[in-house]
Amino acid sequence: MPKVVAKPEVCIGCHLCEIWCAVAHSRTRDILKAFKYEKKKPVPRIVVDENLPECFAIQCRHCDEPNCVFACISGALYKDTETGKVLHDESKCVGCLSCVMACPYGSIVIDFEEKKIVKCDLCEGLEFPTCVKMCPNNALVYISGGEE
């Protein structure tokens, strides 16, 4: 299954992965326009947890048997059988947050403005996850599937 793996031993807690994730999921995909001019501010799907000196980026693991999908009462979360990704259909989300409680990794983010969730989609439509591409310290590694 494809996923992003964090390396806490080199993460410096700069939060650039959060910023670039938000930009990648913004309407304009432009860092200045996304944060300064877009009415609905983009929400990152990755969160850096800091307990200094330790920092750790938390993102969806795209589990083989995802608890979030089993907990989703509306069918908004599903496992793509071809790619192995756990994806979210925003139009079906009712904002019950059952998935947030079911995820053992705490990787599902609440979009308080929309009263729904957002989660990592490994930058669906892009060749490579933006958080990995933009990490200045190579603290994130993309595993496309099959390898560990």
Image (cartoon, helix red, strand yellow):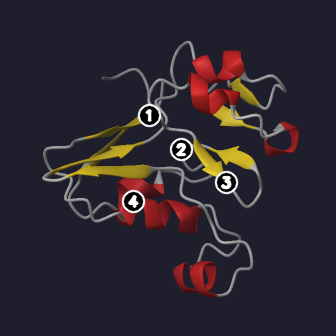
Q: How many labels were placed on the picture? A: 4
- Does the residue at mark 2 contact the one at mark 1 (Cβ under 8 Å)? yes
Q: Residue at x 73, y 61 (%)?
A: 113
User: Which of the labelled discs sits on residue 3, or is there none?
Assistant: 1
Q: Amino acid at mark 2?
A: Leu
Residue to which mark 2 is pinned: 122
Q: Earlier in the sequence, mark 4 or mark 2?
A: 4
Does 51 appear above or below 66? below
Evaluate whether residue 85 shows in this view: no
Label 4 to label 2: alpha-carbon separation? 12 Å
Q: Residue 97: where, in percent of width, then height?
A: 69, 34
Residue 75 location, x and y as percent?
82, 25
> Which residue in the structure is indicated by mark 3?
111
Q: Which residue is mark 4?
A: 17
Sequence-first disc among 3 and 1: 1
At x 52%, y 28%, the residue is 62
Q: Label 1 vs label 4: CA separation?
A: 15 Å
Image-quadrant location for residue 70: top right
